[in-house]
Image (cartoon, rainbow, N blue to C red):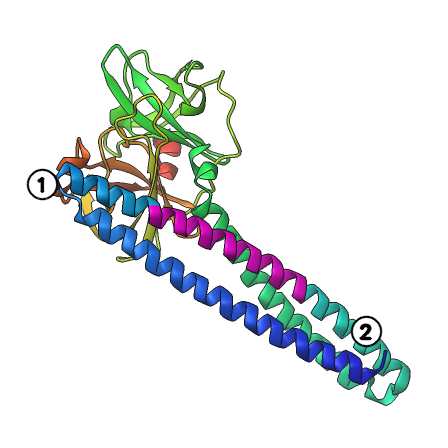
Amino acid sequence: MSITTYTNQIQQLSREISKVQSDLSKEEKNESNTQKEILRIQNSITKNTSASSLRSKMNQINRLENKLADIAKKKGDLLKKLADKNGKLYQAQENLQKAQLREDQKRQREQVRREMQMQQTIQRLGERTAELEKENKLIYQPDYILSNVYVLESDTELKQGTCFHVADVGLVTCAHVLAENLLIFHPSNISKKYPVKIIQSSEVLDLALIAAPDLSLNEGLPLGSADNIEIIDKVILAGYPNYRIGDTGIISIGEVTGFRMISGIRRILIGTPIIGGNSGGPVLSRTGEVIGVAVTGADRLEDAGETEHHGVVPIDALEWLRKNG
């Protein structure tokens, strides 16, 4: 094919890529608005909410969550489409280069410059695509998160809590969740419960590293840092509050509302409720990295509005625990 044909093909692909990017931007805006609506409805639920109103609100939330799932699928399809067109764009550009080299050696230097510019554009698009794929995977695939989150319980002390697996670190929970004859299990297989071994623990930090030698762990959640977390940053809370057989666990999206110094540690306060039993659960950043451990909140969902202290210990405190615990 001629240089003109390849040039027209590149222009057409560029227009198509712009259209896909525009569609992706619209889905992201739709996604953000839907998440805000879910948060608004969640925040409207108080202990005074009637049973009928609660059912209605939960139905609204379910519908919105289904909508989020649809949006996630659309985004995934758009990302695949974008990657495909980027590949075709790259191939068309390479063909154009070869045609130009055959027809006019004098334009070789200019063609190399254009090639470099195009490679940079493709790299930026590829990096953005990878970021979106990572975000999509972590936020819209709750199974990925909850597969690394476990229930802790002690029939001896009638205690229950949550713990989670951090990649290359181990099982993390709160110190106040630890109890005599503590067992760990995943709700996907409640018939398999394993004894827990305490590796390191600090009541001051309210953090603990534990192990369950007989438990087969998944890949683990990626370790992040709370150093750069700011107010109104989006966070994701996961866990098994007041776990009962058949519960799916929770994935709750909220915002950082402030910070509070406790025992020399700057705890993160979040807007999404932390309910009894969720202590020891992971709090993740919008990019899906663990930035903290849920430690304080309300005993029951209906009491969530009575405390401002839905607190999170920064995951960075693990470094101190691993060295000094």
| Magenta stretch holds residue 18 | no
- Extreme residue toward the right, this view: 102
- Is 182 displayed left or right of 261 in the figure? right
Q: Quadrant of residue 10?
A: bottom right
Residue annotated with mark 2: 95
Q: Indicate the amino acid at tag 2.
A: Asn
Q: Is residue 191 above or below residue 219?
A: above
Q: Indicate the amino acid at tag 1.
A: Asn
* Image spot of residue 259 (x, y percent): 21, 50
* Image spot of residue 146 (x, y percent): 42, 34
Q: Is residue 113 above or below residue 184?
A: below
Point 24% across, 19% down: residue: 159
* Image spot of residue 20 (x, y percent): 56, 68
Q: Main secondary structure of the magenta part?
A: helix
Numbered range of the magenta stretch:
63-85
Considering only order in the chain, which callout, 2 or 1, is on the residue closer to the N terminus?
A: 1
Work out whether residue 29 or residue 222 is closer to the camera in this orientation and state it.
Answer: 29
Work out whether residue 47 or residue 217 is closer to the camera in this orientation and state it.
Answer: 47
Point 39% across, 17% down: residue: 196
Point 49% across, 16% down: residue: 214
Quadrant location, the N terminus? bottom right
Dot 1: few (<14), some (14–19), or many (≥20) neighbours within 10 Å? Answer: few
Q: Is residue 197 visible?
A: no
Q: CA distance from mark 1 to mark 2?
A: 68 Å
Work out whether residue 102 or residue 18 is closer to the camera in this orientation and state it.
Answer: 18
Q: Quadrant of residue 234?
A: bottom left
Q: Are marks 1 and 2 in contact (CB under 8 Å)?
A: no
Residue annotated with mark 1: 48
Dot 2: few (<14), some (14–19), or many (≥20) neighbours within 10 Å? Answer: some
